[in-house]
Amino acid sequence: MNATMTPAANPAVALEELARWFERAPSSDAPWLAEMRRRALAHFRDVGFPTTRQEEWRWTNVAPIAKTRFQSAAPADLVEPSRREIFHRMAPYAPRSLGGYEIVFINGVHAPELSTAAAPAIQITTLQDAMARHGAMVRAHLGREAPWEQNGFAALNTAGFRDGAFIHVPDGVVVDKPVHLLFFNAAGRAPAPLLVQPRNLVLIGAGAHLVLACVYAGQDAAAALTNTVLEMVLGEAAQVELVKLQCASDEAFHVAHEAVRLQAAANLLSLTLNLGGGLVRNNLSVRLDGPGAQATLHGLTLAAGRRHVDNHTLLDHACENSTSHELYKYLLAQRAGGVFRGKILVRPGAQKTDARQTSKTILLSDEASMNSQPQLEIYADDVKCTHGSTTGPLDDEQIFYLRSRGIAAAPARALLTYAFAGDVLQRVRHAPWRQYLETLVAGELQRLHIEKAST
Amino acid sequence: MHIVVRCGAALRAPKNKECLMPLLEIKDLRAAVGGREILKGINLTIEIGRVHAIMGPNGSGKSTLASVLAGRETYEVTGGQVLFHGKDLLALAPEERAGEGVFMAFQYPVEIPGVSTSYFLKAALNAIRKYHAQEELDAMDFLQRIKDKMKLLQMDPSFLNRSVNEGFSGGEKKRNEILQMALLEPRLAIMDETDSGLDIDALKIVADGVNALRGPERAILVVTHYQRLLNYIVPDFVHVLRDGKIIKSGDKNLALELEARGYGWLEGATAAA
């Protein structure tokens, strides 16, 4: 770990420090939120950080997080010019050429001077602003879509989040450009690792269409914990393409709880792309809450070094006639570790559920490791649920096929590695984002290849 | 380059008495997989411009021979020698063999999700052009070239946008193999059970594609279990492989005889060998 980190001898000390820190924080919260925070903090004190003794955390040890003494990002640390500089250094992770409506947070703090002008017909603002102006709407959903009672990290976020994005797309509005939520971290002059806790709420009206990209990126050697929560609701027949791009620095921790609820005939297409982070845990929960709801979840993880990336997904089929397709892929080099745990829950009465889950991993070295586990809980009898998982090295037969056509071993391996990743990326529907991600991933793969050759 | 030109081949085309250059000389080739010997001393010379067929029952070593020639690493060559226009073929990597002009049409073509057929074919063609120090083709020249070849095999241009062999029918996969052969213009084309899994219409299309590529500039080695394919790709020579050895050689009539009498008819020959 980075030398700037000062692990406490006792994780309880770090945890107590956090708890006291949130208690002390001056607050302009509405009474309902103050009460929710108080309860969340009590819960966090009660359960603390999860341990590997808990089934849900069996393969991901968060002890390095629990031991770290974090500090909150203070706005005073980052005056406007340096925020602009940080933003420009991160630009490769959010090119302006994609032409999105952007809202930018540097170390968790809203940077209005870097965000683009408001979009017509829809609300893109900060959660703090939304609470001031649309308190009832926020109150109806915040903490309800992503319940924090089940998990220390979600409770920690609820207790201590500072801000985040609020998006509201009214009924029937087809948003003409993608919306980009950009979360950039940079250590700057911070003496200790930063704790950044974005809290995002996205409400999509009936029949509305939106492409939403959430980008989390960290500058080199920016040790930090990003503990983020996204709550999203899709109204009837709404259509959302959600792209999450996680490019935290190799020293950083990234923990996310993303909860999406789909009403009847709503359609979610999501991609979770992990290119960075030292210790990463994504929890993506999708509740299919109305007939005809359809969720398609894709995931791609590239990891090398000693990085550890864990994706947990939950597809909660809560009514009849809903569909979920899931494809998660991992490319793991050196001593990287991957985890995939995909739970499919078919609730009583959720007949005609169609759920398909696939996870595929290529191990590019003997030291890389993968744990993959499907988990099916089915309480209805007329359903179609399938799952499949493969883990192994590159396919020798594919390599031989390419070599027998004149393509040498090294480019054949590179081509197959890219193809494995490209198979996921080509499922991105928004063409400019697809092309951008294809270029970004090709570059990252080249970097992986170089790292591989140098070890 | 050292080229051996000789007339000492065991077989000579019945209608053609002149001396041809041997393209491929297999001498006492032995190969094993997992310590078990499969090829037990193969001797075979193939001259350029000729079509040879290797027939044999399951487990006789037909596909092993094809794979060893193409360079599949799961087989261990335990003895013998293979010269390809005078070069030591067994010393070359699979991609170098392809560069030299060896092409194997796979019995089970591999699916490669995420790689478009067009990208794959262009990469293969340019790899082989590079081997010969030729300039790489740009996208326009490549497309022109591949579209002409696709017409020959009655393939729709939409094939080019699909991932290599992914979701292809059996017939489409085999046509894709012949398309690659047409594009790469090998000197030795090895057809490994190309007829397996094909209905008669697909078989005719594939055979027409192969026949269009017959000519004085290349040799073709057809490996098959059944005589059926040889009605459409008529060989100059037929060899029967059994238990890792060639036990009988003849002209195209040998295939017909095998069809009529079955492999059991050659039991005596095995005993004699």
Image: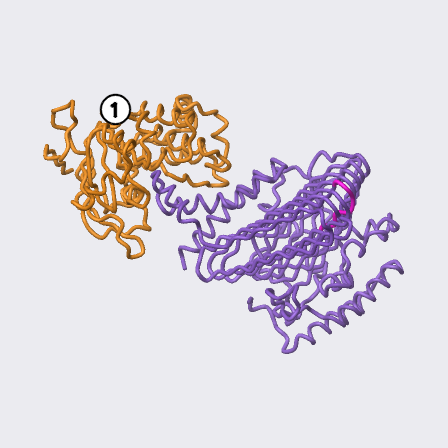
Residue farthest to the bottom, as pictured: A9
Stretch of the chain drawn in magenta: A286-292
Q: Quadrant of the C terminus of chain A?
A: bottom left
Residue type for callout 1: Gly
**Image coords of residue A233 (percent x, y):** 77, 46
Q: Quadrant of the N terminus of chain A?
A: bottom right
Residue B273 can be seen in this image: no
Q: Quadrant of residue B171?
A: top left
Of the chain colours in the picture, the one used for chain A is purple
| Residue ID for mark 1 | B215
Q: Residue at x 66, y 70 (%)?
A: A69
Q: Quadrant of residue B104?
A: top left
Judge from the rendering whether residue A92 lies leftward or rightward of residue A14; answer left or right.
Answer: left
**Image coords of residue B252 (percent x, y):** 24, 28
In this rendered view, identify the residue nearer to me: A52 or A49. Answer: A52
In this rendered view, identify the residue nearer to me: B235 or A319. Answer: B235
Judge from the rendering whether residue A323 lies leftward or rightward of residue A327; answer left or right.
Answer: right
Q: Residue at x 32, y 22 (%)?
A: B212
